[in-house]
Image (cartoon, rainbow, N blue to C red):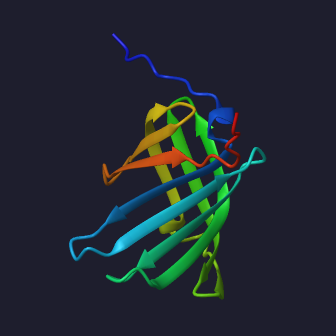
């Protein structure tokens, strides 16, 4: 007996997403993700200190894909506090794979294949129409 693989459409991921959480010390961490239809991504990671000031900002870009219920990323470049670093594509830490747990118009929940860490992103709504 084989398990049925959930298949998700790539188009569900197009657009802007975010997540925010706090560490044990109460510092806020925010991630903004932009996933483009051409397979390019840009992730912005912002670490805040205990009074809300930005203590570190990293922008990562690369390629992404979705096959069945597997989401993957290939990091190609990083800007850390405005300093550019090209990714070493021979280094395995620049490749990640995740199992999609939930994907709909508002929520993208996924789990890292190796670490089992779960991430939950929420869609950013660009325009809110007032009626």
Q: Which quadrant is home to the N terminus? A: top left
What residue do we see at 57% from left, 68% from top? 44
What residue do we see at 43% from left, 43% from top? 110
**Number of numbered markers:** 0
Relative to 86, say whether 106 is above or below. Answer: above
Residue sticking out furthest to the front: 131
Measured as percent of width and height from the top left, residue 45 is found at 51, 70
Res. 3 image quadrant: top left
Q: Which quadrant is home to the C terminus? A: top right
Measured as percent of width and height from the top left, residue 53 is found at 44, 84
**Direction from residue 79 to residue 97 in the image, left or right:** left
Res. 84 image quadrant: bottom right
Res. 77 image quadrant: bottom right
Residue sticking out furthest to the left: 24
Relative to 33, say whether 105 is above or below. Answer: above
Measured as percent of width and height from the top left, residue 61 is found at 66, 66
Residue sticking out furthest to the top: 1
What residue do we see at 49% from left, 40% from top? 108
Measured as percent of width and height from the top left, residue 33 is found at 59, 57
Relative to 14, say whether 101 is above or below. Answer: above
What residue do we see at 57% from left, 32% from top? 105
**Direction from residue 108 to residue 50 in the image, left or right:** left
């Amino acid at each position: 007996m084989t398990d049925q693989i959930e298949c998700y459409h790539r188009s569900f991921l197009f657009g802007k997403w975010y997540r925010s959480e706090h560490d044990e010390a109460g510092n806020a961490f925010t991630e903004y993700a932009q996933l483009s239809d051409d397979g390019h991504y840009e992730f912005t990671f912002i670490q805040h200190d205990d009074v809300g000031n930005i203590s570190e900002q990293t922008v990562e870009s690369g390629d992404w894909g979705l096959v069945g219920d597997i989401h993957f990323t290939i990091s190609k470049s990083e800007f850390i506090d405005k300093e550019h670093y090209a990714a070493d594509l021979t280094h395995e830490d620049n490749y990640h794979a995740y199992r999609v747990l939930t994907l709909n118009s508002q929520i993208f929940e996924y789990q890292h294949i190796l670490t089992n860490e779960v991430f939950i992103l929420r869609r950013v709504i660009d325009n809110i129409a007032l009626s």
